[in-house]
Image (spheres, rainbow, N blue to C red):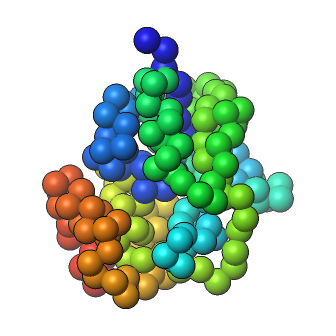
Amino acid sequence: MTNFIYFAYGSNMLNERLNKRCPSARPIGTAVAPSHYLCFKKRSVDGSGKATLVSDGGLGQVGRGVLFEIAEDERDKLDQSEGKGYWRNDDFAVLRSDHDDHLTVSVYLAEICCDGLVPYDWYRALVLAGAIQHQFPEQYITELRCVVVAPDPDPSRKGRQEALRILECAGFGHLLDPGT
């Protein structure tokens, strides 16, 4: 069986979230995307902001993420879960955090970026949980905590309900409390 390396930088950084989508996914380390930064400028079908990486225009920033090895026969599942509005780049360069090795990986990037979007609190909690789980630097975690969020106007939304279950099961339910 062949595998591919996936660079997750948003909600899929949380092991439990990605394993729901791709059961074979196994974290193999962390990496940075040189000259990129994380923002929430991808418009979701629900109108909220979802994570994407964008070029920093040569300012020297880095987008942090988690490297996962995934069975090739689950690639379609990942394509489907990322959904409309993302395009898959299978030739994305990252620098592995633990070895300083350059790798070419698969990543999903927003087709169109929109200013003024805000993520829902549950979505930001998934991203934050992944960063904490993979022991990202405290400064990065603090920056994620400072991202402005909005409460989901539809508490029964399927995506929200699934996120709450995953956060609870992974031990990160507290991240939805105000002030976290």
Side of 136 relative to 176 (left or right): right
Q: Is residue 133 above or below residue 151?
A: above
The structure residue drawn at horizontal position 71% and vertical position 68%, both measured from the top left corner, is 113
Q: Quadrant of residue 11?
A: bottom left
Pick the residue in front: 89 or 63.
Answer: 89
Q: Position of residue 5 (x, y in %)?
A: 53, 28
* Most distant residue in the top direction: 1
Q: Position of residue 31 (x, y in %)?
A: 55, 39
Q: Position of residue 63 (x, y in %)?
A: 61, 52
The structure residue drawn at horizontal position 70% and vertical position 45%, both measured from the top left corner, is 34
* Quadrant showing the C terminus: bottom left
Q: Is residue 12 above or below residue 72?
A: below
Q: Position of residue 149 (x, y in %)?
A: 45, 81
The structure residue drawn at horizontal position 31% and vertical position 34%, both measured from the top left corner, is 23
Side of 14 relative to 10 (left or right): left
Pick the residue in front: 88 or 61.
Answer: 88
Q: Quadrant of residue 155?
A: bottom left
